[in-house]
Each structure stands twice: as structure tokens, then as C-alpha cells.
Image: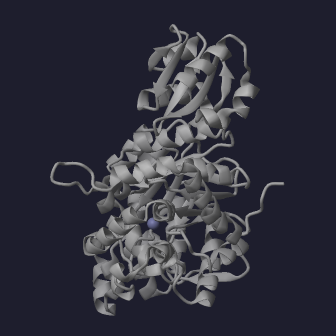
Amino acid sequence: MEKLLGIGEDLLAGKINIDDLKREAHQYNLYPESIYKKDGSILFMVKLKRTRHLVVLGKGVLLDEFEGDYILSNSGKICPLNNFNSKVLRRHFPFTAPLANRTNKTSIGLGDRLGLASPGHIKLVKEYDVFPVLAQQSIRELNLTGRDYKEVLDAASWAVFQENYQSGYGADGDHLKSFSEVKMALDCGFTMITLDCSDFLDSSANHLKEEELAERYSMIDKSVRNELEDRYLNKTFLVGEDLDITFEELDFMRIVLIYLDAISFASEIYRELISQVEKRVDFEVSIDETSFPTSIPAHFFIASELQRNDVKLKTLAPRFLGEFQKGIDYIGDMEAFKENFYQHFLIAKRFGYKISVHSGSDKFTIFPLVGDITQGEFHLKTAGTNWLEAMRVIAHKDIHLFREVFAFAVKKLEKAKAYYHIDGDPDKLPPLRDIRDEDLVGFLDNKDARQILHITYGLILEEKDSSGKYVFKDRIYNLLKDYENLYDEFLNKHIGRHLEGLMLERLG
Ligand code: ZN
């Protein structure tokens, strides 16, 4: 703190300039990219006892507007990175506010559950022509981490400021399921909405026999049926040169029964909320959280009906063939996936949106296919894998804490399976007490261990002892703050492997 006041004084007196400050940033725990000169003030971010702060020096509108403690005879302030200051920041530094993706054909979702990963992500995406969605959380993730959308967005804004990243980023209200959830995310300033239509999908129609199917179908309003039949029944649609889709009767009835309500729901959300927002919002429809793959005719039907309802999609997430489990590679037949993915891509292209790949973390074997087939026109979401890299930092820097966390995760696995479907099995791992510390680090590369840690994050973070103190949360945060460069480095390497696998080119 004394050191900081010293350089503050020197800066104000003009004894040193911004270049000097940048050069010596590290010895003051100051973030070198975060130094700005604006409206008569010098601003930078600094870490004081593990916590990042904004420092504003020099009188002017910025010193007035940011809230904090005055220093240097009221000619400077040390400001907390709170929600009030985040709003001031976004107003005066517009590049710290999220945007819809206007320019990039490739975008990637980089969910940051702890609010500490974005600086590392930014250092990486700076080197690629890719639009990062730095703020991306589902309601499930918010509940499991005890955060809200304001905090999620604020964390991204400060990371962008800290790394001086001016190329634009997005904020995705992920897997939102209701009118009120979408409204909340939009009110917080989110620029992408992923509407999860699961609650409106009637998957029971998958298993109906011919007679039952016809009966259920006949219960749909006759005028609706007639219109749909006119448009689709026994008609063939050509999609690109390689794909034609014909709606035969049984298949047609099944698709209508499964998806009709979901299409109405998505259309209503678009009409009532998304299209009413003044600034642009990227709208994604997700139908991926189902037990059955999205068939090619079903995808076409949904796309065509949404278009008829004037819904402008940016992306759509089908459920592909094979399994996309959390934190591990693709499971399934590669050749079948390739053909299926190509057909989904053709439909998306025909209707003017992009395919969104959910649970995109660690799907290394299919990345080249995704990159090649789409020629970079895709959105891919990752989230949990960034948490796993945080666990890698813990394993490297405090193996005892890691051992405790892992033992706890195994104990709580069944509870966590209520939220996430995985195959990860602790019985496939040797007993924890038999594993030497140096081998335990390797758990982050073991698929059973990865999945166990992946889905238990909420339980790990919220566990409290009898006196109400967090058992792991504070220790995890403290360690990650102490070794933030290592976390950046691990993220850079791991997400870098994703971008390389997807065949994105490094900027020259
Ligand atoms: Zn999804």
C-alpha cells in the first residue's frame, strides 16, 4: 500500500510516466495492460492482499464517479470492483460492456464459474479471430455457485479492462427456460440468450405406436394440422446439393407432436422479449438437453417454422448423434457423427444461422470435423473444463487440499448426478489413500476423475462446517488468486488445444 501511494504521488507529480509504470508494473502487483489515461485521470488495476482494486489518480469526472476511499489528499481513490463501479466502468469504457456478435463467423462460449478465468481466456483469444462469450452461465450454474448475473457480467467487464481487450465480447444467459429468466438476463444487459426448450418438448411421442400416434396427433387443432400438412406432409425439400428431406406421415406426426409447443414457446419469447430490446441480441434456441438426437427432418421443421414466425436465430443447438458428456472426449461413431453434423450444418446454412455445439469442452476427436465442415462458422460452448483447470492449479499447488476436495467429490457424486448425466465412476479409480501425491496430479487427465470433479463443483463450493464457514471455497479462491498466472497458463494451454483442434488460425 505504501509503495502504491509512493508511485501515485510520483505519477501525479509527473516524476514518472505511464511507460515507466508499465515497465515496473509487476513489482507493484499492478496489471500492466490495465493502465489507462482518460479525462484527466490515470487509472489502473492493482492487487492488494489478494483482492483486485481499481486505482483512479487525478481530479476529474472519473474520480468523482467511481466510489472508493480517497487517497493522496483527495486527488486519488482506491475503488472496489463492485457492481456500482462496474456500471461506471461500462459507461466510460464502452468496450467493457458486452455486445452481440456482429463480425466474427466463429464464436466460443467460455463459461467462468468462479469469476477468475476470463483474464486467461482473453490472453488466448487475443491471438485468434474469434468472438469470445466471456460471461456465460446457466441458472443451474448460478444456483450451484451462489452467484447472480450481475456478478457474472461484472467479472467479465473487469477482466476485459484488466487485459485491455477491445475487440468485443458477449454475455450469454445460458439454458434459460422461462419468460422471467430471459427477462432477468436481458435486464442485466446480457447480449445473447440461449432458450432451452426442454420443458416444451414432448418426448413421449418418440415411443408411441402407430395408432396412439395418430390419435394424439388428431387432438391437435384441425386448422393447425391442415396448415402444417399443406406445408410439409409428403413434400420433399432440397437443402443444398447434398440433402433432400421428405416428411412421411408417421415421422411427420411424431415431429409435430414433439416440437410444436417448443416452437410456439420460442416464437413467443422472441416476439415478446428478444425483438423488443433496443440493442441487438443474439438469440439461440437449444433443443439439445434430450435423451434422443434431433432428427434431420425435425431440425428442418423447427427451422422452417421459426422462420415463418419471423424468429431471427443466430444459433441453434441440436442434439447430435453420440454422446457429449461433460469434460471428456466425444463418445460415439465418428463416421455417423460426421454425416449427421454435416446435414445439421446444411440446414442451419439454408436458414441463415449457425450451429451451436453444447458441452463442447474436450471433444478433441471431433473438433477437426466441426472446423472443416463449417469452415469456422460455428458457436461452441465450454464451461466446466475451465473449472477443471482451476482444480489443476489446486493439484499443483496444494495437494492436500486437492486430496480433500476429491474425496469429498466422490462422497457427493450421487447427489450431483441429479443435475448432470455422466458415466464417470469412482470405482474405476484406485482407492485414494493408495495414490501418491505425485500421481494424484495426473487425475486431471483421467476421464473418471475429471467427470467426478466436473459435476460436483457446486457441492464443493457450498460445503460449510458446523460454524458456518466454507470448507473449501475460500481456500480454493485464495490459492487461485495467489497463483493467477499459473491458472492463466493452464487455461491458455487447454483452451488453446480446443482452438487449434477446431483449426482456427492464429492472427499474424
Ligand atoms: Zn446445452
Task: Please determine whether, in this image, residue 197 is positioned above or below residue 117.
Answer: below
Is 216 in front, or is 7? 7
Count of numbered circles on the image:
0
The C terminus sits in image quarter: bottom right
Residue 203: quarter of image: bottom left
Q: Which residue extends farthest top?
A: 73
Image quadrant of ligand 1 equals: bottom left
- Location of residue 6 by image quarter: top right
Q: In the image, is 327 to the left or to the right of 257? A: right
Outermost residue to the left = 466
- Residue 222 appears at what percent x and percent y? 34, 71
Residue at 67% across / 26% down in the picture?
36
- Foreground: 215 or 146? 146
Colour convention of the picture: one colour
Q: Position of residue 146 (x, y in %)?
A: 32, 49
Look at the picture and state if 61 lies above or below 247. Answer: above
Residue found farthest to the right: 508
Q: Is residue 5 above or below residue 147?
A: above
The x, y position of residue 351, in whole percent, is: 62, 64
Whether residue 213 can be seen here: yes
Give whichever of 307, 8 is nearer the camera: 8
* Residue pictured at 62% horizontal, 57% vertical: 489
The correct choice, above or below, for 195 with respect to 230 in the image is above
The structure residue drawn at horizontal position 28% and vertical position 80%, both measured from the top left corner, is: 216
Residue 497 percent location from the top left of the image: 66, 68
Can residue 224 be seen here? Answer: no
